[in-house]
Amino acid sequence: MREIRPGDGGHVVVVDGHLQSHVNLGDPRRLVFDYVRRLGDLVDVLAPEGTPLRVVHVGGAGMTLARYVAATRPRSSQVVLEPDEELTELVRRELPLPPRSGIKVRPVDGRTGLPALPDARADLLVLDAYDGGRVPPELLTAPALAEVARVLAPHGSALLNVADQAPFPLVRTAVAGLRAVLPHVAAGMEPATRRARRPGNVLLLASRQQLPVADWRSRSSTGVAPYRVLDGEGVSASFGGGTPAEDPDTAC
């Protein structure tokens, strides 16, 4: 079931009982969900406000982050891969995208849509796809992450949102798969999630280039809900030891 409910000064997109997105049509810069605010932090760290970006989103729902990029970086070119056509139609009807937003939605999933994109298409690729409250495991396989790396420009970054809990099997698999194709990996999460006190969203940032970890840490410490950012060594200590998954069954 797909529905849109009023909430916290905007609208909440709900799919099968799971809260997917919060959208504020009047102020798309306002990011209510904590993990989305952290995604926005990374957009701000990676590119100055006003700088157009080429962004690929794997997973769309209410397209909150795409709206944020369009508002803060006009003239950005964005492609959203969202297979749920019924959901996209509901969002377009009740939460329409602004005119000339530069956001194009393609009705395909990530494993189908990524291979169709050209090499070096994106400055930023955001993987924020969920099915039943978890990342579809086929998106964390080695072949899928190789497609992520192929689609990135040489200077580009991949940003993955992975919901997990200790001992973090999905995050360990994703880290191993990312490092096989993008050597620099950093991670951000709530302290309680890192300490295994509760499940949570772990953000993984990966690139061929050195990552702006110091800037990300500075940004992470100033919000309403500060969170922890780990560099390469910290990622290895907390989420190392995984093996790249060759098929979805081994990515779970």
Image (spheres, rainbow, N blue to C red):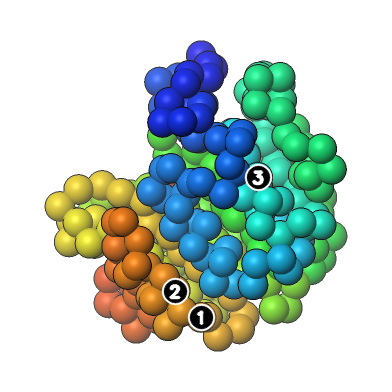
Left or right: 21, with 97 as reference point: left
The alpha-carbon separation of the residues under discs 1 and 2 comes to 6 Å
Foreground residue, 174 or 163? 163
Name the residue: 46% across, 79% down.
215
Q: Earlier in the sequence, mark 2 or mark 3?
A: 3
Q: Position of residue 227 (x, y in %)?
A: 30, 63
Which mark's residue is nearer the viewer, 1 or 3?
A: 3
- Specify few, some or many for label 3: CA neighbours under 10 Å numbering under 14, 14-19, or 20 or more: many
Say if 204 sits above or below 16 in the image. below
- Specify few, some or many for label 2: CA neighbours under 10 Å numbering under 14, 14-19, or 20 or more: many
Q: Position of residue 189 (x, y in %)?
A: 33, 60
Name the residue carrying label 2: 216
Say if 226 sits above or below 219 in the image. above
Name the residue: 59% across, 72% down.
46
Res. 67 mark: 3
Amino acid found under the numbered disc labelled 3: Arg
The alpha-carbon separation of the residues under discs 1 and 3 comes to 24 Å
Name the residue carrying label 1: 212
Q: Which of the 4 image quarters holds residue 109?
A: top right
Please say if the residues under marks 1 and 2 sit with CB atoms less than 8 Å apart: yes
